[in-house]
Amino acid sequence: QALQRFANSLACSVQAMASLFIFGTLVIGAASKVVPIATFDGGSKTTWPWQTINDPVMGGQSTSTFHVDSARSLGVWEGEVRIVPFLKSPGFCNLQAPGLYKTAAFPDLSGTKGMVVRARETNASGITRFNIMLMTSGAKHFLKQGVYTANFVLNGAMEDHFVPFSLFTCTWRGQNVTWCPSLSTQLGKVTNIGVGTAFPGPAAKFHVEISSLSASAQMSSLATSSSEDGIDLATFDGKTAHKWKTESDPVMGGQSDSKFEVKDGYGEYSGTCRIVPKLKAPGFTIA
């Protein structure tokens, strides 16, 4: 009976597939200080020209379009990431302001701790992993323009997604580079902003509605690794790495299984909880 109570307390749904993704972004409430960057309501200080930049610039076949839904004050970006033939892997779609080979004078973000993207993915089976991009006048190396990027995850709800500057890495043509200055020194020099499909990522369609982009000094409701007194216990970007392993109920005669993998800066924990024959109750898995 004791074993059965223990099993029931750890029960997952019978024969149900459990999949948990541990992300480097957080959904947040109101911030104490916000610097508006981009909106789609016609505001004079937050309206910018936007341009889609897709992988055909490197021989791919992905496509995307963008328009402003004035009635709802939303930017609507939709498209499809396809396989790049010569790479035999998925390409990318980006949305940038003010556009390719153009720059603009964006607000000074000094004193803020991260970006806030208010958006949602309306395609239930579409891409959910995206990135946010910042370019600055100081992140250049000869003729190369560095791009600071960090991933975030969208769902079907229109929510604020906070992406700490501590998660941004500098890249050039999708590869990490070391010649960019710290982003913290570049917050007053932003020349371009954008969002894109996470790369590498899946080949799939997407339909994203964006309400606003802003920068936040801090969050009022949730503590994160971006707070001054925060301590990262575990991350999956190499900064606070640990070895992870799974343990399932076969140690007590069960048949459940699970696995844990680190992919593209995320921890992916998946498996199936099954009935333990001798207990006739669901078992468990842990990571």
Image (tube, rainbow, N blue to C red):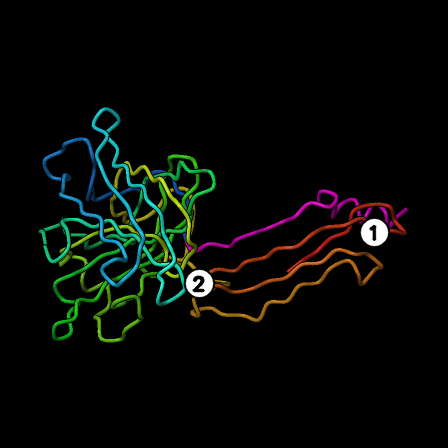
Which one is earlier in the sequence, the residue at label 1 or at label 2?
Answer: 2
What residue is rendered at 54% in x and 70% in y? Answer: 242
The label number, if any, that marks residue 276 in the structure image? 1
- Give the quarter of the figure containing the C terminus: bottom right
Q: Position of residue 259 (x, y in %)?
A: 63, 61
The label number, if any, that marks residue 202 in the structure image: none
Residue 209 point in image, percent of width and height:
32, 37
Label 2 element class: loop
**Which amino acid, mark 2?**
Gly
- Pick whichever, 143 or 188, lies toward us: 143
Q: Is 282 situated above or below 166?
A: above
- Give the label on residue 265, or none: 2
* Above or below: residue 84 compared with residue 141: above
Q: Which residue shows up at 83% across the image and 51% down it?
A: 276
Q: Position of residue 233 (x, y in %)?
A: 50, 63
> Which residue appears farthest toward the front when viewing the image?
85
Disc 1: CA contacts within 10 A as few (<14), some (14-19) or many (>=20):
many
Residue span colored magenta: 1-24
The verdict on residue 14 being magenta is: yes
